[in-house]
Image (cartoon, coloured by chain):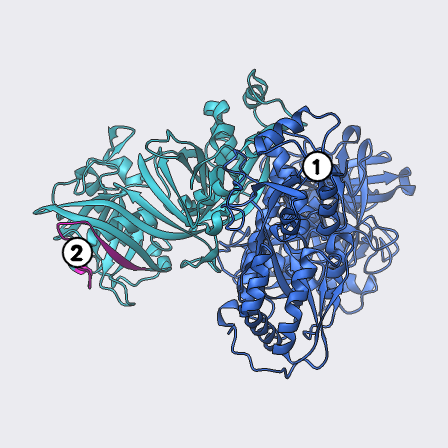
């Protein structure tokens, strides 16, 4: 059983991982982390229960939203998910996943694409850094196709330029902290530069090297390493960094000619060891020194504009696009952007393992049902059952039937409070936000905790925001029409629906309710088209059908039975797996040749999430005791509902199954909240 | 009430071209301890031989030849062979099976696709794929579906629980090597005997001797060479890493499986395999080192694919070992403890096999047909399955041939 959320898988730089819009994930940080643990499968070193590949490289997640900062477009939160332990770390940063952020946001419609390129300002929430990302959007359309190549990725793709806005003089406050572009340090010409990272840049030739040495060779040259360190200490002092003997900056860099006018070879020290490849931040400083005149690294004189430059390192290359303005000595670097690439691999729905959102309070298996002592040590005032629909409807009737019996068993009065509105969301949000002490309960049902959440994003989470108490029962769904409608069976109804102009209509009890879903599925299966009339609950909806104002409805048997008994409505079919004992002559829809509309309404009690286990256990015991009362059972069955007691764990499992089932139905039937509103 | 159903909405999710990107419907799933992708055959069928390109791109393996160190960051594969499985599912003939499955076994660093093997682990994903996409009607309380594997010509019966006829399998089954409880699937291999060679004992004997070591060669679901761990100087409880690091052992086993493969007359595409082919084979025969049980099972096993020691015990290999335990006179039969022999009528024997990941259990149905002759109508094992992600995979830079195939008459219009 799983919770399903939208997900885009991307290859970004040399990483692969899921990208989420912040809204796709649970709202609280705790629940969000749980979702990420499930998405990646953090629990296990092989990560077989998730998308991770058993390595930290593929256990990275990007979370993107519109920025909270006025000068940025996007917030990017990077999360490193554990491999073999259930952890989520948002302290580190990942420049690889960063490359996917702007394309993802444009693709998801968060940022409009311009013609040519689109530049997006990203706030990296982990570090506070701001980055400008430029993405190819020819003709105002995002493309992943292009000619850029990065190390570790086969083939070419569209470039994503990453310009770190806080790079210039980040540490010392000046691009050239010594005030000049070349200093003579211990007899060797050097450039001290602070772009993304403070560097001490030297010509390899000035130290008797070719500049193409392997890192191990350089590390083994102790005389060289000592000389470089002595120069680094002096450079640190001159750059205003003080005594850097205990600091890892500035970093020494040895440069030499590249293999073209636009490339330069570099050996980067960390600072006491040569890097096996090259730090990305160091490449920005090296290419800046390379692009500007008057440094030890300066190359050919360059015109104002954009220049694609390459830093060659022992393991490959890093491409940097440098933008210059001004000529000669007035030449300045406007930006130095890293060239990365990214590609969308897949868009779909991610299904989280059930274990990431277990029942909040109890593990269904060890819940004792029944045997609860009279009175309560936890409840000290009246218990309110919030009903999400109007008084007089099926939910309300059922809740009121329970109050007296529940009250006796809990030793506190139990009252019903109807809070209809927004298709049940008002009541759900109210209970989700209530104090989790057992005094405020929700009468939840298939619409609030199954179908409606599958149809659209709500401000409550049917699983995470509630502690399940237990099931009450279920009621089959019927297809009913006014008695005077001139049809006697489903085939006749379908003929009538096809022949009628204007269209006939059905009654919906609210968006995302069973009467709505069932009617949509019925149209899909029969190829008919119906108008839809919306009512605030099943009670007013069925009353209008009985008046003949609306021509058909899929109510619960509980709602329909009084009208069937009074002869104002007739039932044409049962939208369930079998005929009903109290309506033996009514066939199932499947029997009439219409599969795929099987929907049974269920009803259950919920408390707010984090209600203590002992309280949940007591409420469950009281509920199940009440349901065992012969009077209740008789009343419910006479009204067309089955009693169905359960443990909290079983109710939780049902929620998970329902979530999956209805999301699948919504996906397959193409149901959309706005589409059905017409 | 179970059986195949026609679901227009899933079939509507056809591949389509958008801005030069071929978007292909996929279900990224786990079956048992294997991971990979399930594809709907009718989506692939129009592409003919070009399907290999689609499969390679979906998994992120090289387009041609080899690429050492490929990390599959452009696709859904994740390194080891057990995480590089693509199942193509299509309607069956309705008589032999409800659906056909065809496995494409990929390798992270290679373009070549192995079409000769089935995967008993990944098969566990099939019922969930079918139910979820509305291709199979759920029964109450359970659903059964027969799947014919075209790679090996073996029928697997899959049973899942679908209470209430709802097409959702309860997530209540745990298996060694996977964290958490997921929808359980019981798979039974029907008539698994002689899958590759046509006979239970392809050499005609219960024991053979190669390089002075006694072995048993059996073909149940997969051909396998079984020998005692102590015959090659091992205890039998060694870690997978130490076995893989033991070069002399692997060389010794290679010599044995090459001779055994020749004696079993193993074939590749109908042609007998040569000693060189067997020495380089990544698939058959399997090798299994057995030792007495130590953790409450009936036998303990260390399983080789054959080039590498397996992290657990592949289910097809497990089925073969379980059957071997019940064949009098085999090495496995001599080591196994606590198993009742088969009798003249069909009987079930539950065989528990200890392996590096835990315990693999198989239910063997068999009977003694005549003296020295056994029949195994089916062997069942339990796995669980998981759907990670379903949606459209983006195939960037499809070849010109692929684009032409998309645009060919009779193709669904690009949306």
Chain that appears cyan: B
Determine the image quadrant of residue A611.
Answer: bottom right
Seen in the image, is A605 located left or right of residue A509?
Answer: left
Marked residue chain, label 1: A
Seen in the image, is A656 located left or right of residue A569?
Answer: left
Label 1: state its secondary structure. loop
Q: Nearer the viewer, mark 2 or mark 1?
A: 1
Q: Residue at x 72, y 42 (%)?
A: A545
Which residue carries the number 1 mark?
Answer: A551
For the view shown, which residue lies furthest in the front direction?
A: A566
Seen in the image, is B238 located left or right of residue A512?
Answer: left
For the view shown, which residue lies furthest in the top direction?
A: B409
Seen in the image, is A17 located left or right of residue B341?
Answer: right
Instruction: Provide residue A633's location: percent of width, then percent of height.
Output: 55, 64
Which residue carries the number 2 mark?
Answer: B333
**Residue range (magenta):** B335-354
What is the spatial separation of the Cα atoms under label 2 and label 1, in whole angstroms? 72 Å
Nearest to the observer: residue A580 or residue A196: A580
Label 2: state its secondary structure. helix
Whether residue A66 is visible, yes or no, is yes
């Amino acid at each position: 059983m799983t919770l399903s959320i939208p997900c885009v898988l991307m290859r970004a730089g040399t990483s692969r991982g899921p990208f989420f819009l912040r809204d796709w994930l649970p709202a609280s940080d705790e629940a969000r982390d749980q979702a990420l643990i499930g998405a990646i499968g953090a629990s296990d070193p092989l990560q077989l229960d998730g998308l991770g590949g058993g390595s930290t490289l593929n256990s990275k997640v990007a979370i993107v939203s519109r920025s909270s900062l006025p000068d940025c477009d996007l917030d990017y939160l990077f999360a490193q998910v554990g491999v073999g332990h259930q952890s989520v770390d948002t302290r580190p940063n990942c420049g690889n996943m960063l490359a996917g952020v702007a394309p993802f946001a444009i693709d998801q419609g968060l940022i409009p694409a311009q013609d040519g390129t689109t530049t997006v300002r990203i706030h990296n929430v982990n570090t506070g850094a701001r980055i400008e990302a430029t993405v190819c959007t020819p003709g105002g359309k995002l493309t992943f196709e292009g000619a850029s190549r990065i190390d570790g990725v086969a083939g070419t793709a569209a470039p994503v330029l990453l310009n770190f806005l806080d790079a210039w003089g980040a540490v010392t406050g000046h691009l050239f902290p010594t005030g000049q572009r070349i200093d003579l340090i211990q007899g060797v010409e050097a450039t001290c530069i602070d772009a993304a990272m403070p560097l001490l840049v030297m010509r390899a030739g000035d130290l008797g090297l070719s500049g193409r040495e392997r890192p191990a060779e350089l590390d083994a040259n102790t005389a060289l390493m000592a000389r470089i360190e002595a120069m680094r200490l002096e450079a640190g002092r001159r750059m205003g960094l003080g005594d850097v003997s205990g600091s890892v900056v500035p970093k020494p860099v040895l440069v030499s000619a590249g293999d073209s006018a636009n490339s330069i070879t570099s050996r980067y020290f960390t600072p006491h060891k040569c890097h096996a490849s090259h730090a990305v931040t160091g490449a920005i400083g090296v290419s800046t020194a390379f692009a500007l005149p008057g440094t030890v690294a300066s190359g050919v004189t360059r015109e104002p504009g954009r220049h694609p430059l390459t830093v060659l390192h022992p393991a490959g290359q890093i491409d940097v696009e440098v933008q210059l303005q001004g000529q000669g000595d007035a030449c300045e670097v406007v930006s130095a952007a890293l060239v990365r690439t990214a590609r969308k691999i897949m868009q779909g729905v991610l299904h989280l393992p059930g274990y990431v959102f277990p029942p909040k309070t109890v593990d269904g298996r060890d819940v004792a049902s029944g045997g609860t002592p009279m009175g309560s040590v936890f409840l000290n005032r009246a218990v309110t059952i919030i009903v999400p629909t109007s008084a007089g409807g099926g939910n309300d009737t059922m809740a009121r039937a329970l109050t007296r019996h529940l009250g006796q068993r809990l030793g506190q009065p139990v009252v019903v409070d109807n809070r209809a509105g927004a298709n049940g969301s008002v009541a759900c949000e109210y209970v989700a936000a209530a104090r989790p002490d057992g005094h405020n309960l929700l009468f939840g049902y298939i619409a609030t905790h199954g179908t409606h959440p599958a149809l659209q994003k709500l401000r409550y989470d049917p699983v995470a925001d509630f502690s399940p108490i237990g099931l009450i029962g279920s009621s089959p769904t019927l297809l009913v029409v006014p008695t005077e409608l001139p049809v006697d069976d489903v085939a006749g109804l379908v003929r009538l629906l096809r022949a009628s102009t204007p269209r006939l209509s059905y009654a919906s009890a609210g968006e995302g309710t069973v009467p709505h879903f069932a009617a949509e599925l019925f149209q899909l299966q029969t190829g008919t088209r119906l108008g839809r009339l919306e009512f605030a609950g099943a009670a007013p909806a069925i009353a209008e059908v009985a008046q003949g104002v609306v021509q058909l409805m899929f109510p619960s048997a509980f709602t329909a039975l009084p009208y069937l008994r009074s002869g104002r409505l007739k039932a044409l079919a049962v939208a369930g797996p079998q005929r009903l004992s109290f309506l033996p002559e009514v066939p199932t829809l499947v029997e009439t040749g219409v599969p795929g509309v099987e929907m049974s309404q269920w009803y259950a009690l919920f408390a707010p999430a984090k209600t203590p286990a002992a309280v949940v256990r007591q409420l469950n015991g009281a509920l199940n005791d009440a349901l065992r009362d012969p009077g209740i059972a008789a009343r419910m069955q006479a009204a067309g509902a089955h009693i169905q007691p359960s443990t909290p764990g079983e109710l939780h499992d049902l929620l998970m199954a329902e979530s999956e089932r209805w999301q699948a139905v919504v996906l397959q039937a193409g149901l959309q909240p706005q589409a059905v509103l017409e | 009430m179970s059986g195949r159903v026609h679901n227009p909405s899933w079939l509507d999710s056809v591949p389509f071209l958008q801005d030069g990107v071929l978007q292909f419907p996929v279900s990224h799933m786990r079956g048992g301890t294997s991971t990979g992708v399930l594809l709907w055959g009718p989506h692939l069928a129009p592409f003919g031989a070009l399907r290999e390109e689609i499969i390679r791109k979906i998994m992120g393996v090289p387009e041609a030849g080899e690429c050492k160190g490929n990390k599959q960051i452009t696709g859904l594969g994740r390194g080891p062979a057990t995480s590089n499985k693509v199942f193509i599912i299509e309607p069956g003939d309705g008589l032999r099976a409800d659906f056909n499955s065809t496995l494409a076994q990929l390798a992270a660093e290679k373009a070549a696709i192995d079409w000769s093997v089935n995967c008993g682990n990944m098969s566990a994903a099939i019922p969930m794929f079918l139910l979820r996409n509305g291709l199979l009607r759920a029964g109450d309380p359970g659903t059964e579906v027969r799947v014919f594997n075209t790679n090996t010509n073996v029928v697997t019966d899959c049973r899942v629980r679908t209470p209430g006829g709802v097409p959702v399998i309860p997530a209540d089954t745990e298996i060694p090597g996977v964290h958490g409880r997921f929808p359980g699937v019981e798979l039974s291999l029907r008539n698994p005997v002689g899958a590759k060679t046509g006979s239970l004992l392809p050499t005609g004997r219960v024991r053979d001797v190669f390089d002075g070591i006694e072995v048993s060669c059996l073909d149940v679901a997969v051909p396998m060479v079984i020998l005692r761990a102590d015959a090659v100087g091992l205890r039998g409880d060694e870690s997978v890493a130490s076995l893989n690091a033991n070069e002399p052992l692997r060389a010794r086993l290679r010599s044995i499986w090459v001779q055994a493969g020749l004696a079993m007359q193993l074939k590749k595409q109908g042609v007998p395999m040569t000693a060189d082919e067997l020495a380089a084979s990544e698939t058959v025969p399997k090798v299994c080192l057995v030792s007495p049980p130590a953790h409450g099972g009936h036998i303990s096993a260390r399983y080789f694919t054959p080039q590498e020691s397996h992290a657990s015990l592949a289910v097809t290999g497990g089925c073969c070992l379980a059957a071997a335990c019940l064949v009098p006179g085999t090495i496995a039969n001599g080591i196994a403890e606590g198993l009742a022999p088969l009798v003249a009528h069909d009987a079930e024997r539950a065989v528990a096999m200890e392996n590096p990941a835990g315990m693999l259990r198989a239910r063997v149905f068999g009977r003694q047909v005549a003296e020295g002759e056994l029949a195994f109508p089916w062997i069942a094992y339990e796995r669980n399955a998981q759907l990670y992600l379903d949606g459209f995979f983006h195939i960037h830079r499809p070849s010109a041939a692929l684009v032409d195939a998309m645009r060919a008459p009779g193709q669904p219009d690009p949306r």
